[in-house]
C-alpha cells in the first residue's frame, strides 16, 4: 500500500503503522476477510462506523458476518494509535489488544493454529472461525481442547467495572472526575488503565444503561472507554 493511499484514510498514520502497511498490507484469511489497517475488501456500514466514535478517532481493522467490528483507537491530536477494541450488536464491548501490532500477531498465530488443526474441523475455514471466536463447538472428538493454547483462547475475558458519570465525578480520581464532568447524564464509562489482557465491558447489561444504540469514545490513550446512547 502506498503512502498516498494512507494519507486518504482520514486519520493520522504514524510511521510504525505505515511500515506494516507498505510491506505486508492486510492479512487476508479467505472467506473471513481481511485483518489490518489497510484492508480493502469489506465495506463497513455507516452505523458501525458511527458507533466507533468521532470521525478521525479510530480506524476499523476488521468486521465480519457475526456483526463484530474491530477498530483501533487513534488520538487525532497526537497521531498515536492505541488499543484495539471490538463491539457487536448486543451492546457488548471489549478491549482485545494493547496495540494493532499485538493484535495482528495474535491473528497470525490463530491462522497457524487453524492450519495445523484443520483435520479436526471441516477444513481450514471452520478451524479458523473456531480459533478466532474461542468456541470449539465444531471440533472433532480428537481435537485437544485441553491444550494450553486452546484453554487460553477459550477463557472468558476479564470483566471491567462499569461506572456512571456520577460515580466517576465522585471517585476522587482526577482523570475519571474530569472525564465524568464532560459526559452527559446517562453515559457510562470503564477504567481500563490496569487491564492486563482482553477485557469485556458490559455496558449494555448494566441496569443504568438508558437504552438505545451506544456510541463509544476513548480517552487517556484509549485507557478509558465510554458509551453514550444515541436515543
Image: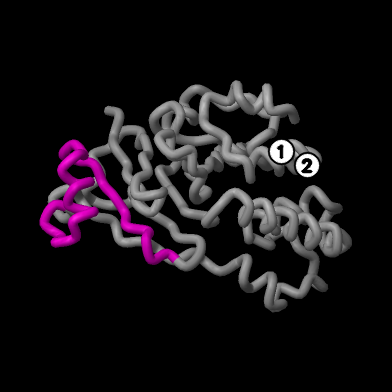
Point out the image quarter for the C terminus. top left
Residue 52 in view here = no
The residue pinned by badge 2 equals: 24
Residue 86 on image: x %, y %: 51, 46
Residue 230 on image: x %, y %: 30, 29
Q: Nearer the viewer, residue 199 or 92?
A: 199
- Residue 100 appears left or right of 211: right
Asked if 186 appears above or below 146 in the picture, the reply is: above
Density class for disc 1 (Cα within 10 Å; few <14, some 14-19, many ≥20) is: some
Residue 167 on image: x %, y %: 15, 55
The residue pinned by badge 1 equals: 21
- Residue 186 belongs to magenta span: yes
Q: Which residue is drawn at 75% across and 43% down?
A: 27
- Residue 185 belongs to magenta span: yes
Query: Is disc 1 placed on a helix, strand or loop?
Result: helix
Query: Is disc 2 placed on a helix, strand or loop?
Result: loop
Mark-to-mark CA distance, 2 and 1: 5 Å
Amino acid at each position: 500500500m502506498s503512502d498516498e493511499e494512507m494519507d486518504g484514510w482520514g486519520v493520522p498514520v504514524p510511521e510504525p503503522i505505515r511500515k506494516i502497511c507498505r510491506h505486508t498490507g492486510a492479512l487476508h484469511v479467505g472467506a473471513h476477510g481481511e485483518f489490518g489497517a489497510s484492508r480493502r475488501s469489506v465495506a463497513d456500514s455507516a452505523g458501525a462506523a458511527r458507533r466507533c466514535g468521532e470521525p478521525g478517532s479510530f480506524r476499523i481493522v476488521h468486521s465480519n458476518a457475526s456483526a463484530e467490528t474491530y477498530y483501533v483507537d487513534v488520538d487525532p491530536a497526537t497521531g498515536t494509535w492505541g488499543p484495539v477494541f471490538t463491539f457487536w450488536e448486543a451492546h457488548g464491548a471489549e478491549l482485545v489488544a494493547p496495540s494493532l501490532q499485538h493484535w495482528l500477531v495474535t491473528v497470525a498465530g490463530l491462522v497457524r493454529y487453524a492450519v495445523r488443526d484443520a483435520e479436526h474441523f471441516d477444513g481450514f475455514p471452520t478451524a479458523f472461525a473456531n480459533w478466532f471466536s474461542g468456541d470449539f463447538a465444531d471440533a472433532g472428538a480428537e481435537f485437544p481442547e485441553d491444550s494450553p493454547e486452546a484453554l487460553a483462547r477459550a477463557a472468558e475475558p476479564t470483566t471491567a467495572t462499569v461506572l456512571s458519570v456520577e460515580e466517576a465525578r465522585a471517585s476522587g480520581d482526577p482523570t475519571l472526575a474530569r472525564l465524568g464532568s464532560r459526559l452527559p447524564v446517562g453515559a457510562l464509562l470503564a477504567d481500563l488503565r490496569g487491564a492486563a489482557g482482553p477485557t469485556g465491558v458490559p455496558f449494555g447489561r448494566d441496569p443504568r444503561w438508558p437504552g438505545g444504540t451506544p456510541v463509544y469514545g476513548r480517552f487517556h490513550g484509549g485507557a478509558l472507554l465510554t458509551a453514550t446512547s444515541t436515543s
